[in-house]
Amino acid sequence: MRILMVCTEKLPVPPLLGGAIQTYISGILPHVSQFHDITVLGISDSSLPEQETIHGVHYVRVPGKIFEIYRENVVRYVEANKFDLIHIFNRPRLVLPIRQAAPDAKMTLSMHNDMFQPEKIDPEEATAAIAEVAYIVTVSDYIGNVIRCLYPQASPKLRTIYSGVDSERFLPGNHPKMQKIRNDIRRAHGLENKTVILFAGRLSRNKGVDKLILALPELAKKFKNLALVIVGSNWFSENDITDYVAYVRALAKRMPVPVVTTGFVPPNEIQNWFAAADLFVCTSQWQEPLARVHYEAMAAGLPIVTTARGGNPEVIFANENGLIVENPEDPSDFANKIAQILSDQSLMRRMGEKGRQLAISIYHWERVASELLEVWEQAEKTEQAVVSEEQAAGMTIEPLKEDATEQLNRPTPKADAKEKVHSKKNAAASSDKTKKGKTKKERAISMEDHQQTAKQKEAAAERTELAKSAPAPKQPQTGRHIKPFTIASGNQQTLDASPKTHLNRKLAQAKHDTKHFTIASSH
């Protein structure tokens, strides 16, 4: 299929300035582009050309730091080009304008924040947008549940796909590739012989790093040679001194523990600070969708302390890869959880090893891409069936335009003659069906067909080693054990079990896998 991925207007792709959505897109592109013709439409940046093609992926960049301007430029581009499927990232307000510009394209939506809240989108427009998309992919069950509570009719379209991390870039500090980097950073900032607690994120009240700073006096009474490193600025590449940033820095100066504030760190260097640390703490005060720093900390082999806010707890298995702070507003709660880990070196090591194991075996970009490919394939095949089921169930769909319902009833387009994911064997067996425009049930969406690079092969080998004690997976060379997303046959469309269920099952299978890991203590 010819697929258009529409980014947000905030930051460019590739993620030169950071950004969770931009990192997500860059992580899956090497995999999904091997199956489809991909165009990425995003915001322009002075350091990037307006158009370019890299590794077969087409990048188009348009002006518009303000949403309304960006929307106009996106619509103009969509009107001038034809795509089989359009995937929109985190902007439900783009759905209807894009639908008008591309009435025949299938549409899917990824939600990385709670952008369906009434203060962010008019309920009438939200209802119509939900009716227009085949599926809504969310980065956590939390985001899916927020949408489900606001708009119950969205429930059969919701699919949680947890994000991923490059475990070949984020490595433990004792890894041969990172040992010198770790030592150099610690030496340069006076962190030698210190137990380093790391925070990485934006410096804003809802991120709550001040609560961690306020926990330091209590921790200093129990542990010697502690240090805190705060990586981040008020807004990605900007290092403006806001009132909150000034407050954090002033607070840090009064602490009995050394506090290093780095300001903005370029995305291509952030992994070095994870390698230099011993423990990671996420202090989110708001209902965070699911901060991607959790994946990065796991890949770096760091035990995690996070908050019971939003989707953050969904990737933390208590006493396995981290601990959860139930009352994030209380610095003492942070101090207690951090102390619980620091006082038990064996627990600290096991948590780091388990996190690294999960990052390699589950939270990798191939798995994310594979699940998204399944959603796209189902969107191509079953959009009409999903809509029909909703209508049969008597769900109310109020389109903004009188012809919105008619658009939903449009016939399924014929298959693209240049489809990249046809299996030769299946194509031969079903050539008559394809010519008649029937559904392509025999199409293979197997990551085994990838022409893996040497880097991918190395990562795959490591995942296979992890899975030796687990039941043989369907695709043994990648070590993936998560059951693929499926939609039941027949009239009733159902989603597979929650990804968290699969993760719990995976965790149960891998209880003794930690013997494959040894992460040296820094003490």
Image (tube, grey):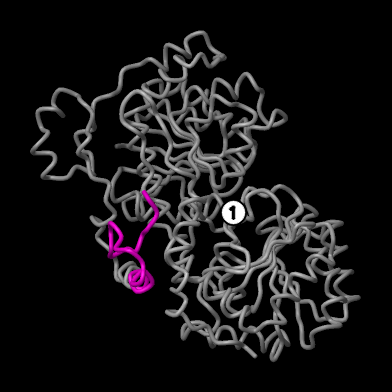
Is residue 385 rendered to the left or right of residue 420? Answer: right
When the figure is inspected, residue 307 is found, relative to residue 256, above or below; the finding is: above
Element carrying mark 1: helix
Residue 512, quarter of the rendered image: bottom left
The structure residue drawn at horizontal position 69% and vertical position 76%, both measured from the top left corner, is: 341
Is residue 232 rendered to the left or right of residue 400? Answer: right
The structure residue drawn at horizontal position 63% and vertical position 83%, both measured from the top left corner, is: 185
The structure residue drawn at horizontal position 42% and vertical position 17%, both measured from the top left corner, is: 408
Locate the C terminus by quadrant.
bottom right
39 vs 398, nearest the viewer:
398
Residue 120 at what x, y percent from top left? 68, 31
Residue 219 at what x, y percent from top left? 82, 78
Locate the N terminus by quadrant.
top left
Tell me the residue that label 1 is attached to: 314
Residue 191 at what x, y percent from top left? 71, 86
Does the magenta stretch mainly form a helix, a strand or a loop? loop
Residue lying furthest top in this view? 402
Magenta residue check for 464: yes
Magenta residue check for 451: no
When the figure is inspected, residue 224 is found, relative to residue 324, above or below; the finding is: below
479 vs 39, nearest the viewer:
479
Amino acid identity at mark 1? Glu
328 vs 58, nearest the viewer:
328
Q: Which residues are magenta?
A: 462-483
Residue 24 at what x, y percent from top left? 49, 53
430 vs 69, nearest the viewer:
430
